Image: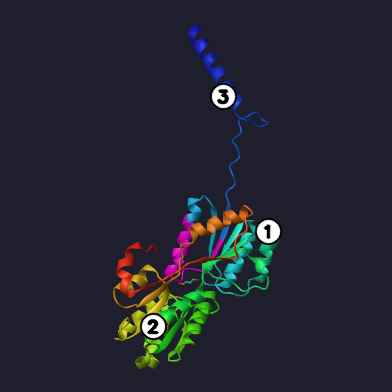
Amino acid sequence: MRWMIAVALVALIGCKQQSADKPQSPAGEAATPPAAKKLSVGFSQVGAESAWRTAETKSIRGEAEKRGVDLKFADAQGKQAQQIQALTSFIAQKVDVIVLAPVVETGWEVVLRQAKDANIPVILVDRGIKVSDESLYTTLIASDFVEEGRMAAEWLAKKMNGKANIYELQGTTGSAPAIDRKKGFEEVLQKYPDMKIVKSQSADFTRAKGKEVMEAFIKSDRDQIQAVYAHNDDMALGAIQALDEAGMNPGKDVTIISVDAVKGAFEAMVAGKLNATVECNPLMGPLVFDTINKVRAGEKVPKFIQNKDQLFEQANAAQVIGSREY
Ligand code: AHR
């Protein structure tokens, strides 16, 4: 009996000692230390119109998860009004940072002013905007779309020996990549008077519309079509389908160049149906969160952080396809 009382006393003293080491709440209970607040980021994405866009979303979401960031994701389904609504809601929720991939270039002043007044930095990803006051956003992380257009035109002019009837599939009207890829392409064509854009129409960056617009071009201009310049791979893949179905020969009788360098474009090049693609890197998750950390630490970041891109041709597609990450 005596030894049982001794054991109970030792256990009691041990317990008291342990709880004395822990911080105590005013009520005397042991308090758990407050959990560190997670960084909260609101990400307003354009939508899921292309394989490129899906890869970008995956990269940003994956990186947020890896770093334990509370990412509030909003898909705008291609509508600016929905993006403005998402931003307004992020501001009301007092997120730490907003990441915006803007559908179009204009119409952002009011909501970005609200973010600025609430001291929430805005990081633009992949597409730029036009604002009268550049302090409304912190930085833009993107490719140089004008340069992509130039690269495509230089390649096509060389391939066609400076002479071609070109049919252009434009991206979403009013979006930075549609405006700038056209601008860079046309700038280079000035040097080649026999390289002519015969028809140019928006196909909204989607495969379905790329096919639809190409079908209309074939219907009216079948025998004149020598080259296609598509502002993204998805539209080029739709156009290839239309040309195939019309019994034409994409990649041989019709030379096709597009932008993005997604896996599907490499498959089409390996199959001999697409001739070239200009890369536009969507894997920006790590860079986005590194930049956010710098901004929050008070470091100055450049106004434009540029992704570097390169051009891939049919000839080296089979070699490269295995190493493509998107
Ligand atoms: O802003 C980048 C462009 O948007 C990509 O080239 C295109 O595929 C996309 O949807």
Identify the residue under disc 1.
119
Left-right relation of 272 to 134: left
Magenta region: which residues? 43-62
Q: Which residue is mark 2?
A: 158
Question: Alpha-carbon neighbours of circle 2 within 10 Å: few (<14), some, or many (≥20)?
Answer: few
Q: Is residue 204 visible?
A: no
Q: Nearer the viewer, mark 3 or mark 2?
A: 2
Residue 138 drawn at (x, y percent): 62, 63
Q: Position of residue 276 (x, y in %)?
A: 37, 76
Residue depicted at x 38% and y 85%: 227
Residue 228, by quadrant, is bottom left
Is 64 placed above or below 225 here? above
Instruction: List the residue tagged with mark 3.
Output: 18
Label 1: few (<14), some or many (≥20) within 10 Å?
Answer: some
Q: Is residue 44 magenta?
A: yes
Q: Secondary structure at mark 3?
A: helix
Q: Which mark is residue 93?
A: none
Question: Is label 1 in a helix, a strand or a loop?
Answer: loop
Amino acid type, residue under disc 1 in the picture:
Asn
In the rendered structure, which disc, 1 or 3, sits on the residue that comes first in sequence? 3
